Image: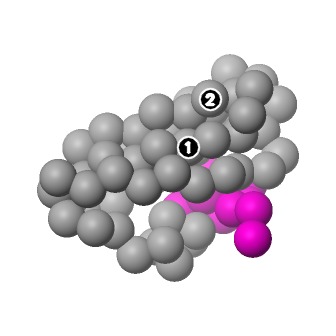
Amino acid sequence: MSTSTYTVTGMTCAHCVGAVKEEVGRIPGVTGVTVDLSTGQVTVTSDQPVDADVVRAMVDEAGYELAS
C-alpha cells in the first residue's frame, strides 16, 4: 500500500474536487483519492507507488495543476 499527497492549484468548488478525484482515480492501481478543497491537498492511495508525472498528467486532464 502506498500513499502520496500532492497540492493542486485552481480548485474552487465541489465540481473541481469531483473532476480531480475522477481523473486521478482512473490511474491503474489507485485505490482511493481524497481531496481537501480548503488546502488543495490531494491524497492518493494505491497498490504500488504512482509516478508523480502520471498524477500530474491526470490533474492537468482535469483542468488543474500540481503545485511545483
Q: Which of marks 1 and 2 is nearer the N terminus?
A: 2
Q: Where is the C terminus found, in terms of image quarters?
A: bottom right
The reply, left or right, for residue 39 in relation to residue 32 is right
Task: Please give the count of numbered marks on the rendered protein.
Answer: 2
Q: Nearer the viewer, residue 26 or 39?
A: 39
Say which residue label 2 marks: 36
State the SS at label 2.
Answer: strand
Q: Position of residue 30 (x, y in %)?
A: 27, 52
The residue sitting at 34% across, 51% down in the picture is 3
Cβ–Cβ under 8 Å for marks 1 and 2: yes
State the SS at label 1.
Answer: strand
Magenta run includes residue 41 = no
Q: In this view, does 8 lie above or below 41?
A: below
Say which residue label 1 marks: 42
**How has the structure been colored for display?**
one colour
The reply, left or right, for residue 21 in relation to residue 10 is left
Q: Position of residue 50 (x, y in %)?
A: 34, 68
